[in-house]
Amino acid sequence: MATTASPMLDTGSSTSFKKIWQGLTQPSDLVQGESRRKATTLSALLLVFMPLAVIVILVSPITNILSGKPMSLSAPGVIAVVFVFVAYRFSRTKYHEIAAYVTVGIPIFAVAAIILTSTTPTTAISLFYLTLSVVLSGLLLDGRGTIITGVGAIAFFCCSSACGSLIASPPYFSIPQPWSSPRTRGRPAGGPSRAGTSTWAR
């Protein structure tokens, strides 16, 4: 007789995984109704974001170490990871709404940090991540919160586009090179070595 595997054999592992997942995503017992569903969704999202955020900020330092360069961590990236962990902690309590607002604000903070710390013009791809805040607000916040987030993202996009010329041309400061001699320190680049002649007179 041919034997078939019973579907009950994998029930134990699936049940244990379900219990672990519920233990990591279920909010406080004080949260009930629709708020409980949103809090559970928020905890699940943050539970996925936490390891991904850690991997993202560690890619550049590990690459620098392998290539022989000094290790450096991005300060905005570290702050964003801390916010993700703090938001997850709040999502498991009755203050899950605070975690929702923090999660919605993380993409806006990330784009703002890129604009303030980068010397290159802000691209449309960077500003596209602002839509992630609007999507998250639709899942985690009420209608008023979603509208406020959408209006804020549009205003932030317009301000960033208007200030693009300022970001594209940051101020530069001339720093004298310590290894140059006093004679050549003030000489224009490409000038002749003889005294009394100048490239500006040509």
Image: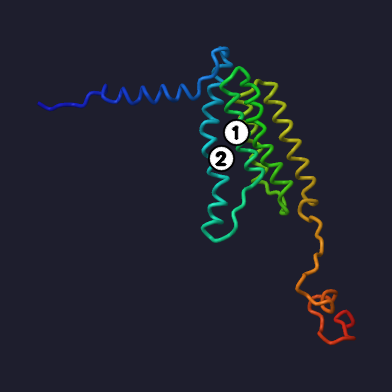
Find residue 126 and report its image quarter: top right
Q: Of residues 11 and 150, which is closer to you in this image? A: 11
Left or right of 190 on screen, residue 103:
left
Circle 2: residue type:
Ala
Earlier along the polypeptide chain: callout 1 or callout 2?
2
The coloring applied to the image is rainbow
As drawn, the residue found furthest toward the left would be 1
Find residue 151 and report its image quarter: top right
The reply to whether dot 1 and dot 2 touch (C-beta < 8 Å) is yes
Circle 1: residue type:
Val
Q: Secondary structure at mark 2?
A: helix
Find residue 27 and report its image quarter: top right
Q: Residue at x 57, y 51 (%)?
A: 60
Q: Which residue is mark 1?
A: 84
Q: Which residue is mark 2?
A: 53
Q: On screen, 201 above or below 91?
A: below
Q: CA distance from mark 1 to mark 2?
A: 8 Å
Q: Of residues 72 and 101, which is closer to you in this image? A: 72
Counting other residues with Cα less than 10 Å from the Cα at mark 2, is it few (<14), some (14-19), or many (20 or more)? some
Left or right of 82 on screen, residue 112:
right
Q: Residue at x 63, y 26 (%)?
A: 100
Q: Of residues 179 and 21, which is closer to you in this image? A: 179
Left or right of 131 on screen, residue 170:
right
Q: Of residues 133 and 184, which is closer to you in this image? A: 184
Q: Secondary structure at mark 1?
A: helix
